[in-house]
Image (spheres, coloured by chain):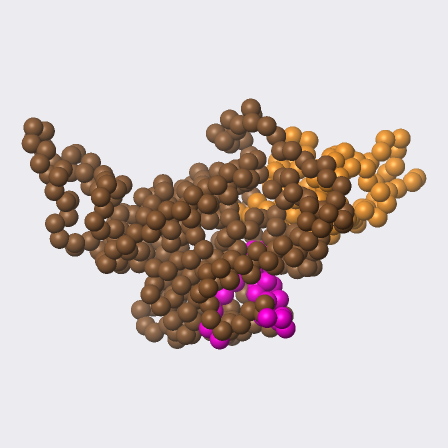
Chain colours: A brown, B orange
Amino acid sequence: MMCSVGDDIFEGDKFMPTKQVTTSKTCNKCKTAEPQLVLRGKDAYCKSCFLEGVTHKFKSTLGKSKLIRPRDRVLIVYEDNGNSTALLHMVRNGLNLSTPKKLNFIPVVVFVEDQYHLPLKERHNVIEQAKEVITALNFDLILVSLAQYATNSGSIDKLIYSEGLTISESDKDELFKNVQTDTSDTNKTELISIIKRNLLIEVAKHLDCKYVFTSEISMDITTNLLKNVSLGRGSQIPLESGFCDDRDTQVKILRPLYLFDSKEIEYYNKYNNITYVHARTDEVNTYSSIHTLMKKFVMDLQNNFPSTVTTVLKTGDKIERVKGKAICQLCKAPLCDNVPQLTSEESTKFSSLISNTKVDFTNLDFVDKPLDQTDERVFCLSCNELSKCLINS
Amino acid sequence: MAVLQIGLEFGGGAEILVGNQKVHEISLLITDKLWTIGGLLHWIKDNILKERPELFLQNGSVRPGILVLVNDADWELMDTVNYELKPNDRIVFISTLHGG
Ligand SMILES: [Zn+2]
Ligand SMILES: [Zn+2]
């Protein structure tokens, strides 16, 4: 459900100028047709220029990367929302073209069942609706249960279904059975997203896909970026908040919609008569986790100062990638090595050293020494905290 | 009595606020006052908004993040709440506030 109002914490912006509404009588692009919609609070477009612009942005996002080669296999992640439905349509349109601009990869669509906030019957409905949407677009669909994946150490091929995926009321308990009961919502959400990412990589490898497409839009990317900063995952921003997550050597996760905003997606769906069923989302308290709080914050930014969301997004794009040989065993991100300045990881260690040892402050020798003499780290800073929520790990 | 017939559509999760029904064909009584979208929003609040009106309406308009289309066009091009409704208009409300 949508979040509630009355959060005056974000309402200190009354002095800022309000959105300027365009008075333009013709489309910004073709300069002839009557405009139908306004983007970024100022640019007016007619329907056909808008749709052309969307297709162009999608193609150039994929094309600029020069990653995908003809006949490469791509795993596309379907979720029951407008963004991923739009993504599937854009891909289908691109594959169906008969011009040289035709997309040339081989798609497989995956739906990961993790709708634990819904009653069992509604979860079954969501699966059925996913099947309908995806077969109508002429894609092959596979189904995987997040809970089964998290609790089975066996081979992934036994967990991939095209029909007859079993789901049960106890899936959520199963998923969290190795997680301490007092784990915060923030940490649970982190764990789920790490498990999900690992699942997608494994499924992609099993199906011989070199790429995974996910459907995050600009607001999701910005939310994720700010979330990562606040959870001490700053070094992972280039992986999680750009177009490409290449932490795995074989499978890259690509986000073809990362430059789109929600208005563009909704109008794209509307003008193409794309209907999608919006399953009820979890009715959560905005303050229950860092994730929901950041989401609310970015949503307010998007509504009041849309260009700020883009600015944060572009800043994220400029952050340099971390190079390191060692890899975090949980989130698989590289662990930073040879860091010239003090990172949040080291400053945390430093402060814990300060607070846990009786330090002779006249002798601060240890500051100059590397805090890790040998690299025995198993987890990144943030996952190190997360790992404490896991039982028997 | 004279009525103004229009169609309303709700999507993106906004339908959940109006009894989980996406399409509403409605008749508005014509009085001496012209019907604007602003007036329509009040009508929606009084007649079909089933729960938590603050999730749909704020400060005399729709809540920021809910898109409004008048016959497929953005209401920002139509003077928003001041737009005068015409017979058979289709007004679409799409929520972009999924989750959280
Ligand atoms: Zn045009
Ligand atoms: Zn990690």
Magenta stretch in the rendered image = A71-100
Residue A193 image position (x, y, % from top left): 40, 55
Figure quadrant of residue A228: top left
Figure quadrant of residue A176: bottom left
**Residue at (65% x, 33% y) in the render:** A20
Along the line of sight, which residue is nearer the eye, A14 or A56?
Answer: A56
- Whether residue A270 sits left or right of residue A282 in the image: it is right
Vertically, is A55 above or below A110? above
Residue at the top extreme? A15
Q: How many marks?
A: 0
Residue at the right extreme? B1
Find out whether residue B97 is within the magenta segment. no
Residue A32 image position (x, y, % from top left): 76, 49
**Residue at (57% x, 35% y) in the render:** A304
Residue A123 image position (x, y, % from top left): 53, 61
**Residue A174 visible in the shown view:** no
Along the line of sight, which residue is nearer the eye, A148 or A45?
Answer: A45
Find out whether residue A82 is within the magenta segment. yes
Quadrant placement of the C terminus of chain A: bottom left
Along the line of sight, which residue is nearer the eye, A248 or B92?
Answer: A248
Along the line of sight, which residue is nearer the eye, A342 or B55?
Answer: A342
- Whether residue A192 sits left or right of residue B70 in the image: it is left
Residue A233 image position (x, y, % from top left): 33, 47
**Residue at (46% x, 45% y) in the render:** A314
**Residue A242 visible in the shown view:** yes
